[in-house]
Amino acid sequence: MSRYDEEAKFDRPKRRTRPRTKDRPSYDDAEIGFVFTRDRGRYACWVEDSDGGREVTAMKARQLGRTGVIVGDRVKLDGNATGDEGSLARIVEVLPRTTLLRRSADDDDPVERPLVANADQLVIVVAVANPEPRTGLIDRFLVAAYDAGMRPLLCLTKTDLADPDPLLSIYRPLGVESVATRQGGDLTALREQLDDRTSVLVGHSGVGKSTLVNGLIPGADRAIGVVNEVTGRGRHTSTNTLVLRLPDGGWIIDTPGIRSFGLAHVDPDKLIHAFPDLAELAEDCPRGCTHTEDAPDCALDEAVAAGRADADRVASFRRLLASRNSSS
C-alpha cells in the first residue's frame, strides 16, 4: 500500500455544511427613539408613549459597525427599552435622516464632522455688541444651513446695547428671517419661531445662547459665562450638545460656543440651489461657471444688468460663496 493510500485512511475534518444566511432581524416592532445626548458610549433617547414619553439609555449594537449615531438621530431600540433605572437598550438601526448639519475642523480638512441630524431650523445667535458680531462666521453658518437643507433664523441678542438694523441690513437681501431680543426682555417672538420645530442653536461664545435657553425653558440651568473685557471673546460655558423640549411643543438643540466653522465638505456648486431665483438665472451660465464676481460671462451679471435680478441679492450670494474659501 502506498503512502498516499495510508493517508487516505484518516478522515479529514468535514467542512461546515450549514449555509450562511443573509437574513437579519427586521425589528419591525422595535421602539423608535430620538437621541438627545451622548456620554461615553451611552446614548440617551426619548421614546414617545401614552404617558407623554420616557428616557431610555442605550448603547450602539455591534452590528451597526462604523455607522455613526449622533444627536437628533431617530433610532430603533431593541432589548430593555423600559427606561427603568439600570436598564440598557441597544440601538439596532439608524433611520434615514431628513437633514444633516455638518462642519469640518477647517477649510483644509477633508473630513466632515456630523453635528446634528433631523433638525429643520438653524438659529444663528448673534450679539449686536459685547462681543461684536462676526459677519464672516454668520455667513458660514448660513452656508452650512443651506447645505443641510435647514431654514436659517438670525436671533440678535443684547439689542439694548446697540442698534441691530445695520447688521440686519446685510442679510435682508438673502431673505433671512430674524428676531431681536434684549437682556431680560420678552421672548414671545422667538418662541413663535421655535414652536413645533426642531431648532439648533449655534453661535460664537458669549453671545447669550445659554441665557436664551434658560429663558425659554425654566429649569434648564445651562451655565452662563461672561465676555472677556480684554479679548472681547466669550468663554465656552456649554460643553456638550444637548436636546431640550420646549414647553409649548418643539425641541431646541443647544451646542457649545463655536469660534470657527470649517466648510471643506460643502460643494460650492450646490450652494446656489438654496436660492431658486438665482439658480434659475444661472441655468444660462457657461458650463463650469463658478458664479463669483470674476467669473466670465456669468448669467447673474447679465441678469443684474437687464434688471431681472436684484444686485444686492446677487452680491450677498457671492459673499456666501467667498466665505466658503476664506477664514472666518
Image (cartoon, grey):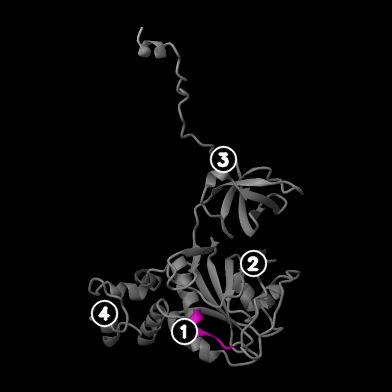
| In contact (CB < 8 Å): disc 1 and disc 3 | no
Q: Which residue is mark 1?
A: 172
Which residue lies under the disc numbered 3?
Answer: 27
Answer with mark 1 or mark 2, whichever residue precedes in sequence: 1
Q: Secondary structure at mark 4?
A: loop
Q: Residue at x 50, y 64 (%)?
A: 113
> What amino acid does circle 1 point to?
Arg
Q: CA distance from mark 2 to mark 4?
A: 44 Å
Query: Mark 2: which amino acid?
Result: Asn
Q: Amino acid at mark 3?
A: Tyr
Assess whether residue 147 is covered by the magenta stretch.
no
Residue 172 rendering spot, x and y as whole percentages:
47, 84
In this view, 133 is above or below 76: below
> Is residue 133 in the magenta section?
yes
How far apart are the alpha carbons under marks 1 and 3?
48 Å
- The earlier-in-sequence mark between 4 and 1 is 1
- Magenta stretch: give its range: 132-138
Q: Looking at the picture, how far across and down is residue 3, in whole percent?
A: 37, 13
User: Could you say which disc has been placed on residue 298 in the image?
Assistant: 4
| Secondary element at tag 1 | helix
Earlier sequence position, callout 2 versus callout 4: 2
Give the quadrant of residue 231: bottom right
First in sequence: mark 3 or mark 2?
3
Q: Amino acid at mark 4?
A: Cys
Seen from the viewer's position, the closer of residues 10 and 77 is 10
Residue 56's tag is none
Residue farthest toward the top in the current orientation of the protein: 1
User: According to the image, label 2 marks what residue?
Assistant: 240
How many numbered markers are drawn?
Answer: 4
x and y percentages locating residue 125 in the rendered image: 58, 78
- Between disc 1 and disc 2, the foreground one is 2
**What SS does tag 2 mark?**
loop
